[in-house]
Image (cartoon, rainbow, N blue to C red):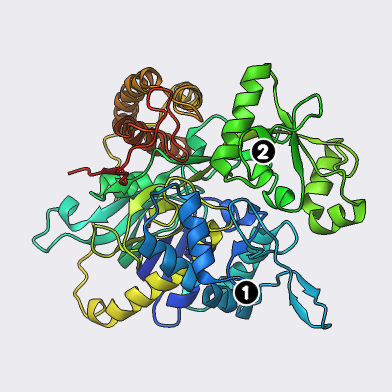
Amino acid sequence: MTQGLEHRTDALIIGSGAAGLTLAIKLAQHAKVTVIAKSKLKDGSTYYAQGGVAAVFDEDDSIDSHVDDTLIAGAGLCDRQAVHFTASNARKALEWLIGQGADFDTEIDSDGQSRFHLTREGGHSHRRILHAADATGKEIQQTLQQQARQHPNITVLEGYNAVDLITADKLGTEQSNRVLGAYVLNRDSGQVETVQAHFVTLATGGASKVYQYTSNPDVASGDGIAMAWRAGCRVANMEFNQFHPTCLFHPEARNFLLTEALRGEGALLRRPDGSRFMPDFDDREELAPRDIVARAIDYEMKRLGADCMHLDISHKPAEFITKHFPTIYERCLELGIDITAEPIPVVPAAHYTCGGVVTDLNGATDLPGLYAIGEVAYTGLHGANRMASNSLLECLVFARAAAHDIEAQLAEVQQRPVPPLPRWDDSQVVDSDEQVVIAHNWHELRLFMWDYVGIVRTDKRLQRALRRVEMLNTEIQQYYSDFKISNDLLELRNLVQVAELIIRCAMNRKESRGLHFTLDYPELTSDPAPTILSPR
C-alpha cells in the first residue's frame, strides 16, 4: 500500500528545542515553516536544561575571556573561529531571546540598580551564566513555544518521527544533488507521510540514549546524525560523548540531572565517608571541566567499589539553596533527600554529544539545502569537551545564523519548479510479530556501549563493541526491510548507526584527550585534529 499525506513547505525543521524553534520563529517572517516533534513540543533536552546560557554581560568579563575558557575546556580541539563566532554573537542572541519574553533571574547591585544574576560553572573564569533559577531550559522552551504556536506561518506537527531524508540522488533525478524533503511517521495513524521542502534543518539533539545511563530524555536517539550520514554527510568527533559528572543516583529518578551550578555556588564532592576527593585530581577542584570531574568520580567509585559519590551543598544557608535551586530541592525532597541538610548521591551519566554532523558557521551541511543546528551538529565549538552552558548558546547563535543564510536563498529557490515526491511504499512488508527482537537488541546495544565505550576505554573493548554493533546492524537492517516501521524500530536503527560512528571515531584516536580517555594511549599527541568520517 502506498501511504500518506503530502505536506509542502518552504522549510522543514526536524526537532523542536531551542535550536529548532529559534530557527522557526526567525524564518517565519519570510517563509512557510513546518516543525515536527517526535513527541510533545517540549519533550527535547532544552526543556530539562537546568544551568543556564553563557554570555558576556558583566563589564569585568570579556569575549576574549569566554573564548579562552572554551578553548581550554575543549582540550586543544576547538575551532577558534567557531568559538569566537559563538562568543561574539552570544549577547545579541540572548537579547533577542529576552525580547521574545524570556525572563532570567536578576539582582540589585551596590548602586541599587537591577542587573542579571550571573552564576559561574566549571571551566568559566568569570560569572557569565544567565539563568532562570535552576530551570533555565524550561523558561526558554516555554518562551519559544508560545511564540511559535501563535505564528501563522508556523505549522507544528507533534507525534511525528522523521524516517529518512529525501534527496535528488536517492530519487535518481537529473538535477544536482540536494535535499528535497523527508519521510515522516505519524505515530497516531501509523502512516508514513511525505514532507516536501526547499530547506530541511536537523535540530534533533544528541545521541546519549545510546548509553545505558543517561541524563537525556527518551527522544535523544541520534536520529539527525544517522539520517545525515545515510544522506551522504560527513560526521566528526563522535568519540567525544560528555558524561555529566552529577546525575542523581536513585532508582526512581534515573535521568535527573544535578546542575553544575550547584558546584558553581559551592557544592562539594565527597566520598561515602564524607572526605573530599577533587583536590586530589585537579587544582580547580569541583570547578574543573566536566571530563575531569566525571573521570574522578568514576575512578573513586571503582577504587572503593561504591555505588555512588555524594554532592554536598548543605553547608550553605537553607534559604540560599531553596531560592537558587528550587526544582532540585523539591524533586530531591520528593525522593526523601533534603539537600539543605544532607549530601546528594550522584553518578556520572551520558549527557552531551560533542561531535555530530559537520557544518559551517551558517549550520549548512555537505548536502545542499540541509542544515544542522544544536547538539546534532559539529561546528568546532566544543572540541574534545563542551564547557558548561555553551550548549543552549550554540542552539541560539547557530539557529540565527542558519536563518540568515536560508533567508538569502529563499527568493531564488521559491521560483524553482517542484515536482511531486514519491509516496512511501510499504506494500512489501508486514506487521512484526516479534517485538522482543527490538527490545532485546535495544538493551544489548546500550549495555555494551556503557561497558566498552564509556568513560574509560581500551582497544580491546572498542573491538568487542564494533563486532557486536556490526552484528546488530545486520539484524536490524533485515528487520527494517521485512516489517512495518515503528517508533522503537526507527530509534534502534538510528542508535545502532550512531553507535558504530562513535566506536569508529574512538578507534581512530590514538591518544587520550578531553572526553576520550583510553588506557592504551594515555598521553596527548602533539598535533591533534578532529576525527572526520565520510560515508562516501
The answer to which of 95 and 426 lies nearer the viewer is 95
In the figure, residue 418 lies in which quadrant?
bottom left
For disc 2, the marked residue is 247
For disc 1, the marked residue is 57
For residue 274, above or below residue 12: above
Q: Residue furthest left?
A: 174
The answer to which of 42 and 417 lies nearer the viewer is 42
- In the structure shown, which secondary structural element does the residue marked by tag 1 occupy? loop
The answer to which of 148 and 376 lies nearer the viewer is 376
Badge count: 2
Residue 190: x %, y % from top left: 45, 45
Answer whether residue 112 is visible to the viewer in this image. Answer: yes
- In the structure shown, which secondary structural element does the residue marked by tag 2 occupy? strand
Crowd class of label 1 (few under 14; some 14 to 19; many from 20; radius 10 Å): many
Amino acid on which disc 1 is placed: Phe
In the figure, residue 283 lies in which quadrant?
top right
Residue 66: x %, y % from top left: 53, 64
For residue 340, above or below residue 27: above
Identified at 68% across, 18% down, the residue is 304
Locate residue 350 relative to residue 494 in the image: left or right.
right
Amino acid on which disc 2 is placed: Cys
Locate residue 143 relative to residue 191 in the image: left or right.
right
For residue 295, above or below residue 415: above
Identified at 44% across, 72% down, the residue is 400
Identified at 61% across, 45% down, the residue is 288
Residue 258: x %, y % from top left: 70, 44
